Amino acid sequence: MEEVTRSVLAEEILKRLDLENLCSVACVSTTLRSAVVSGVLPSLTSLDLSVFSPDEETLNHVMRGCIGLSSLTLNCLRLNAASVRGVLGPHLQELHLLRCSLLSSTVLTSIGSLCPNLRVLTLEMADLDSPAVFQSNLTQMLNGCPYLESLQLNIRGILVDATAFQSVRFSLPETLKVLRLQPLLESEAILLMNRFKVTGTCLSQANYSALLSSSPSFTLQSLSLVLDLISDKLIIAITGSLPQLVNLDLEDRPEKEPFPDSDLTYTGLQALGYCQQLTSLSLVRTCYNRKISFKRINDMGIFLLSEACRGLESVRLGGFPKVSDAGFASLLHSCRNLKKFEVRGAFLLSDLAFHDVTGSSCSLQEVRLSTCPLITSEAVKKLGLCGNLEVLDLGSCKSISDSCLNSVSALRKLTSLNLAGADVTDSGMLALGKSDVPITQLSLRGCKRVSDRGISHLLNSEGTISKTLSTLDLGHMPGISDRAIYTITRYCKALTELSIRSCFHVTDSSVESLATRERQAEGGSKQLRKLNVHNCVSLTSGALRWLSKPSFAGLHWLGLGQTRMAGRKEAVTATICGQRPWLTLCFDGCELGCYDGWEFHTPQRH
């Protein structure tokens, strides 16, 4: 009878819980621990540990019972090579190693020798080795993984040597369907395309059918590259070698203004039409602190693109300052199945581009308009008629005001809203707070006219958002004080991620309020997983009392940079992280979870 009860417990209850809840259940009694260890963990085929960064001991405890894994995802922020090597084996077919700030490229040789059956591999690594050493280790890995179908290699750092993938073209398996490389030189990318080339003849519309009927060795469908330069020559090489592409994602970061004859022009955009199966396109030029953009592309270039690629379902464009409403509107009207539309830094994009958006792209599910200064509330009102919209990102569109928030409130499928830097006020928060829009992620960062009263309107107006909101960003808001945090702790029961960085009026009382929320289990509140108080200068060392155990039992990540506690890193780490090996402290100013910036620092060790 006991065996039957244990079997029912494992099959009907425990197997429906995620790993964190399983660990909590295992701590309740020896019976439940045995049920988890013997009845659940061995049956897991997939394990995702990306939401927190385990240390070696925690990883070993979790992995000890997982004997049937074929898919593993690890946050390696605090793991060394030996720790990772211990979880590798021929049973793995899918492996994702993320934020590998401590791992050198020797881990590549370990993967090649221990995981011969890999189909999917993702690696995010810091730039710790010379290009020659990295290339040698990469070659060994690729030779040891002949069945790879998806390979994503992301090498990050301050001055990453872009020659790291110089020899990768010689070792790529022919089974590859998805490839992402960062960083890569344009010249090396062109040589790589020659490796993929399906025919030696020039590509033209006339021989396109014959080209597709041939049997190329490579059947790559998705290509993503971060380069030093996107040029016509590169685009023509890609379309000539990979006409079967479904997804193309290119980003460049040129050090200086490209020469006119080596930059992207109409010719390159028109060549994209040769990829007749293309449904997703991303072309982005990112130049930090430098005014470098696609200066040779204007509306005519986008006209040619929209005519050549009418089957696009996802478009992402960044760094096109000479393209105006006419160009962007042509994409919205020509691509009838467009679901995702993202534009960054379009200084000529205005409300006019969305004048007839419901008559053209009524299938839109995601719209992201970042740093588009001419976009106002009128454009948002038009987008409010797109009933399928799930994501609306208006970050740094400073002319957005309260007048459009009633339209936003009518979007019954909207789950993510970014109003960072908008000119919204407390009155606008009342409109959102009264609505039934099921927003789970909300950013009000830099909204200087929203105060504590606005947060009260947002969460205490009997709308849906207080029940659904899980991620909230209130960073850089001078009107936010302890009173707003009190409102959050009282009404925002589903919140798991909170950023209040650079909120100068937030004091120790806010930390106490959040800690008290955590302890009131009868209130039904979820535990905070990530908390960012970076540059909250009014916090004192007295807040340590509330950040220490048993408060914030579920916290995975805590940002404390530029606070009074940052000057006592070792003592703070010992106090906060005692008996909590899964908690990562960040003193380096990263955003929530160190998703961007992990390569620049080593997390505080416990």
Image: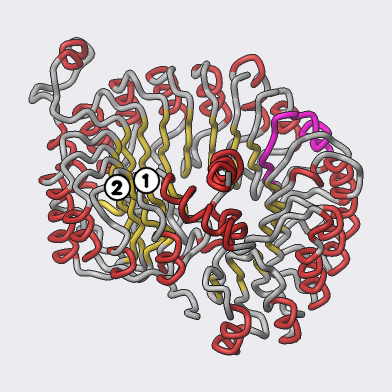
Q: Position of residue 87 (x, y in %)?
A: 32, 59
Q: Nearer the viewer, residue 332 or 529?
A: 529
- Quadrant where the N terminus sits is top right
Residue at numbered disc 1? 71
The residue sitting at 77% across, 72% down in the picture is: 511
The residue sitting at 16% across, 56% down in the picture is: 113
**Is label 2 in contact with label 1 (beta carbons under 8 Å)?**
yes
Q: Decide if residue 540 is on the left or right side of residue 31.
A: right
Secondary structure under badge 1? strand
Disc 2 versus disc 1: distance between alpha carbons?
A: 6 Å
Q: Decide if residue 261 is on the left or right side of residue 369.
A: left
Examine the rendering and report whether any part of residue 352 can be seen. yes
Residue at numbered disc 2? 92
Q: Nearer the viewer, residue 70 or 571?
A: 70
Q: Position of residue 590 (x, y in %)?
A: 54, 67
N-terminal of the pair, mark 2 or mark 1, is 1
Q: Amino acid at mark 1?
A: Ser
Q: Position of residue 239 (x, y in %)?
A: 25, 28
What segment carries the magenta color?
403-418
Q: Nearer the viewer, residue 362 or 213?
A: 213
Name the colouring of the figure. Answer: secondary structure
Residue 409 magenta: yes
